[in-house]
Image: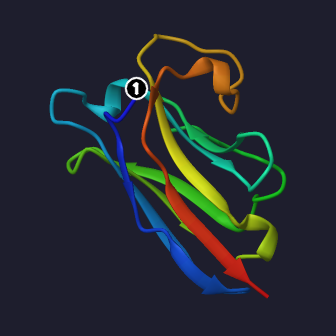
Amino acid sequence: QGQLAESGGGSVQAGGSLRLSCAAPKYALISHYFMAWFRQPPGKEREGVAGIDIDGRTSYADSVKGRFTIWRDNAKNTLYLQLNSLKPEDTAMYYCAAESRLSIGYPLSLREYNIWGQGTQVTVSS
């Protein structure tokens, strides 16, 4: 853990937006990794939010489809998550994750990732 560095969290009102970033070390090119964002609401289990594979294909949890967008900037070696139309239920610690295997199963499953960041807090007030 700790090889990925998330930033961009904060406190916003419902309907607001945030952009999360996940910077990877230079020796770990994210273009070679499956990448994903997870979140853990207070008192709940960690859940998958969005994932992006090596070919750029994306997947989203139903709860965030149409509101969140995942993408990566290979030149900056950084993964992003744009959060729009935020709701109080989006309040959580958000984590970035990476996996170097050539193929994985369900891209929003915790068990598929072995590299994690420390998280960034997102708080949405009503």
For the point 16% across and 27% down, the residue is 27
Q: Name the quadrant containing residue 31.
A: top left
Reply above or below: 83 against 39: below
Side (left or right) of 22 relative to 43: left
Residue 121 placed where, x, y %?
54, 63
Residues packed near mark 1 inside 10 Å, few (<14), some (14 to 19) or many (20 plus):
many
In the orientation shown, which residue stands out farthest toward the front?
A: 43
For the point 70% across and 76% down, the residue is 86
Side (left or right) of 79 relative to 105: left
Residue 20 placed where, x, y %?
46, 63
For the point 83% across and 57% down, the residue is 63
Reply above or below: 39 against 87: above
Whether residue 85 appears in this view of the structure is no
In the orientation shown, which residue stands out farthest toward the top?
A: 102
Residue 92 versus residue 52: which sits nearer the camera?
Answer: 92
Q: Name the quadrant containing residue 30.
A: top left
Disc 1 residue type (three-letter): Tyr
Quadrant of the image for the N terminus? top left
Quadrant of the image for the C terminus? bottom right
Residue 12 placed where, x, y %?
60, 85
Element type at marker 1? Answer: loop
